[in-house]
Amino acid sequence: MSDYKKIDKKKKEWENGKLKKFLERAPERKEEFKNSTGEVERLYTPEEEIEEKYIGQIGFPGKYPFTRGVYPTMYRGRLWTMRQYAGFGTAEESNKRYKYLLENGQTGLSVAFDLPTQIGYDSDSEMSIGEVGKVGVAIDTLKDMEILFDGIPLDKVSTSMTINAPAAVLLAMYIAVGEKQGVSKDKLRGTIQNDVLKEYIARGTYIYPPEPSMRLITDIFEYCSEEVPKWNTISISGYHIREAGSNAVQEVAFTIADGIEYVKKAIETGLDIDKFARRLSFFFNAHNDLLEEVAKFRAARRIWAKVIKEKFDAKNEKSMRMRFHTQTGGSTLTAQQPDNNIVRVAIQTLAAVMGGTQSLHTNSRDEALSLPTEDSVRVALRTQQIVAHESGVTKTIDPLAGSFYVEKLTDEIEEQVWEYINKIEELGGMTRAIEKGYVQKEIQDSAYRYQKEIENNDRIVVGVNKFQIDEKPPKDLLKVNPKLREIQIDRIDKVKEERDNEEVSNKLKKLKNAAETDENLMPYILDAVKEYATLGEISDTLRDVFGEYQESIVL
Amino acid sequence: MSEKKIRILIGKPGLDGHDRGAKYIARALKDEGYEVIYTGLRQTPQSIANTAIQEDVDFVGLSLLSGAHNSLFPKVLDLLKKNDAEDIIVFGGGVIPEDDIPFLKEKGVQAIFTPGTPIKEVVEFIESKRDKIGK
């Protein structure tokens, strides 16, 4: 009899003996304990021979299928990049916050843009009323971007930019700022989110319909593979899918299905998988269910490696590595007893780190209330530093591997993710699945169930539906200058006076002509940006050619 | 519940794409037996007011998480008033700091539901207005 069968026999004896008697006296708290994959068993024990499974499915760090991590030494070599997403108000204010974060030991920048910037409107557009500088920094022209990175040498930092529909424009501005600082394109390091599919599904800052949006994305892939080789050209994001209410399985499934769609498009346009796949990066959420989250990250790495190797026939192992950024789950924060959020974020940080993340943003305790203050951002950053230097989890690689539960859950998540991926393929791929509303509906059903569980007290959220106290609303919240729109409008007016307006319209015309062909648009956008064409002018030029996306409402 | 159903429009003014809350409220209120219409993302105050009037709703619930509530919520109220529809009851929800609530109430927003509010509080609010709207 093999080892695991012997264990199984002993387990049955235990169940029918000790356990049974115990349960008669002391029943468990609940009839059923659940996670995203379904029911959680009382006790996990080995279920199969480990040797074959280990070699095929678990493997070694830095080697296919990367279950244990993408690098051979992981955090023993280098800690993850601590990257706090920040930006608000004017470029001057955000520049000050970046310098503060760098002085406090942060190792990379992450730029938050305001909503008008993310949707391609200038601050002076009527659509921007009330929104300028609110959830991020307002960028209208290259001028703002010069101020944003003033005194921050772009060859010394890596910069992540949460920008999607107008990603090409912001990347072009970043390249132009680099040039002004004397830093050439091939030295720039960073990431643009550039993941429009999840905008249709979950985040909402789309501009154009799927087809031209996909074209802009592959234009960026192509341009960067030659010109900006160290740039991560996309961050395929499950974060927002989870925030919209998906469970852990759906987060991985829909993110990977998005990834498959981008890879297909890139291959269709003639790009070589082993040339661009290594620049694809991912972005996940970290929630409170610590072990489930660790299993989720491990499963995601393994599935992606298989997708790239088996579906797309890549040869280079670097193409198969899923590198990802993580942010702790914004929707897990509560407005009630906000200090409790520090504890949630600490658990989520552990999940991300034991899941092998490459970079991490930790949310601040006050983010269910407003933008975070400097003090609460520091606590969030310190949480990462405590996990990095005091918790001990960084001493060995993938420390939860071999846990019977974590391995089993990793397998179960993988299995259910493949079911979704196959289903989406049957629907004709992710773009079709989104157009049909299938993905949105799946997420909404999960979100609805989750909220109902809270309403019915089947799920406890501390301070919200249990352990409540009477509390005074917090007072010291960060306020964004309400005069911001006027400040930005003055700056746009000044730029428009100083720039060569004839040259601007000339460049915009060229961009429009190129958009009507299938030429790569990046060089045209870069030319327009350098002449201080506004983000809105460039986006409108493309709106004229591409049209705008209309949301299909699914309730 | 009486014969005539209460009609509610859930609107998302502004540019933010966080519609989890709006969609939850819309669906949960529907489950409670109300007639609910959801506008979808990125609606201008004008289009929300127009829809509210055309659809002859009793309530408008505005959801916003970007911080633009102080500019956009009062605009919806102004437009309803201009079109002789100030009898439509407006409430709001989202990430809205406590400090802003008195201002919004003064502008005519009758209730603000911040994150973590149980749906039954929203239902109680709606039911408390039933006599006033004559349903």
Image (spheres, rainbow, N blue to C red):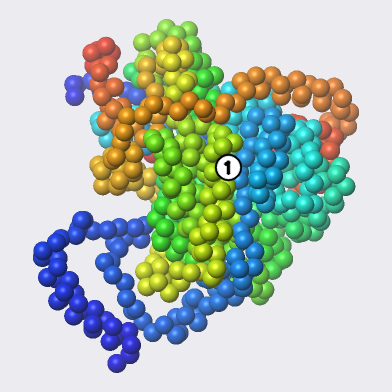
Left or right placement of residue A515 versus residue B47 in this view: right
Give the total number of marks visible in the rendering: 1
Label 1 sits on what residue type? Answer: Arg
Secondary element at image label 1: helix
Left or right placement of residue B15 versus residue A253 in this view: right
Q: Callout 1: residue from which chain?
A: A
Residue at point 51%, 64% (across, down): A393
The picture places residue A306, in percent across and down from the top left corner, at 54, 71
Q: Nearer the viewer, residue A114 or A525?
A: A114
Q: Is residue A20 above or below residue A386?
A: below
Residue at point 17%, 71% (across, down): A19
Q: Is residue A524 above or below residue A57?
A: above
The picture places residue A440, in percent across and down from the top left corner, at 44, 46
The residue labelled by disc 1 is A378
Q: Nearer the viewer, residue A65 or A209?
A: A65
The picture places residue A399, in percent across and down from the top left corner, at 48, 69
Residue at point 62%, 23% (across, down): A481
